[in-house]
Image (cartoon, rainbow, N blue to C red):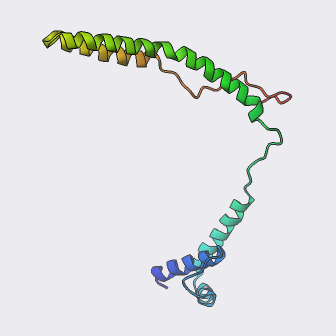
Amino acid sequence: MNKQACEEIQLAAMALADGEKAAMSPSEIEEHLAGCSECRRELEGMEVLRRLLEQQQRPEHAEKLWPVIAPKVSQSVRSSRAAAIWPYALLVFVLLAGRGVAWATDGITGLSVRLLLVLFTVTLFWLRQENPFVVNPELKIENQPYE
């Protein structure tokens, strides 16, 4: 058989296996499979893969974790927000003051002030780098030691 015909047969067989309407009848597919060992091997491999995938299951936890975790997360978020406000307030103040100075001056002084503002902003953001995905190692669920 040619490769194109084999691909069409395999697609039709997969469609039938999925419960969909195939481009050809089941008898045509069976007739082709009877004479083509390559297609039979391919479909058998797909069937094995389908069975393996059906065996996979997500583990279900009996304990509800969110009520235990939520208070710790919200407390962490509140404290990090309060600590994060002052640098940006300072940034706004410095940018507004610097913009006023740059507007009032011309030439090289205005350019120097603008460059200093950019440098200050970049430095502030560089210094404030934090990883928001840090996991709290002290977080433990009652009666269950996770390590």
Q: Foreground residue, 134 or 147?
A: 134
Residue sitting at 62 percent across and 77 percent down?
20
Q: Quadrant of residue 44?
A: bottom right
- Does residue 147 appear in the picture of this structure? no
Relative height, residue 121 to residue 73 (above, below): above
Can you say which quadrant of the picture contains the C terminus? top right
x, y (%) of residue 74? 66, 25
Task: Specify the quadrant of the image occupied by residue 123.
Answer: top left
Choose top left, top right, bottom left or bottom right for residue 111: top left
Of the pair 58 and 112, the residue shown nearer to us: 112
Measured as percent of width and height from the top left, residue 27 is found at 63, 90
Vertical arrangement, residue 90 with respect to residue 42, above or below: above
Q: Nearer the viewer, residue 74 or 56?
A: 74
Residue at the limit of the structure toward the left, as seen here: 107
Residue 114 in view (yes/no): yes
Give the residue displayed 62% in from the left and 20% down from the top: 78
